[in-house]
Structure formats: C-alpha cells, structure tokens
Image (cartoon, grey):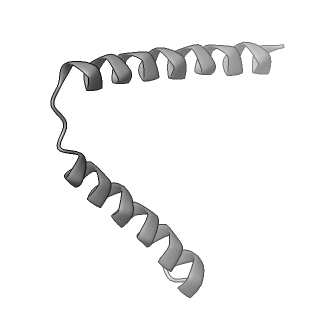
Amino acid sequence: MIRLVAVALLAVFVWALLARLVAFVRRRDIDWTGVTAFAGFVVLAFWLRHVTGIG
C-alpha cells in the first residue's frame, strides 16, 4: 500500500514538473540548436557506453 502511494505521489510530482516546463517553454525564446546538441551529446554518450562497455 505504501508503495502505491509513493508511486502516485511521484507521478503527480512528475506531471506538475512537466506542466511547469511546458509553460516555461511557451513563455521563453529557447535556443533549440543548443538543446538539440546537448540531447545528442547525451544520447551519443549512452550509445558509446553501450557499444564499448566503458564508462
């Protein structure tokens, strides 16, 4: 029962965080080139870790 409550609270927290993030993105002018480069770097790091087994 406690596990169910913890998961429900976590889901509500993530939903609220995503709602604030969407509102923030709509208000601001975001440099999507930088965001894309950052996301690509993270994906590349995970892929290289998977392929090489280092890290």
Q: Is residue 3 left or right of residue 10?
A: right
- The part of the image, by quadrant, that contains residue 19 is top left
What residue is shown at x 52% (from left), y 23% (from top)? 14
Above or below, 53 relative to 44: below
Q: Is residue 28 left or right of residue 24?
A: left
Disc count in the image? 0
Quadrant showing the N terminus: top right
Which x, y percent locates residue 33? 22, 53
What residue is shown at x 42% (from left), y 71% (from top)? 45
Front residue of this view, candidates 47 and 54: 47
Which x, y percent locates residue 48? 49, 79
Above or below, 47 relative to 27: below
What residue is shown at x 45% (from left), y 23% (from top)? 18
What residue is shown at x 68% (from left), y 15% (from top)? 8
Which x, y percent locates residue 31? 17, 44
Which x, y percent locates residue 55? 47, 76
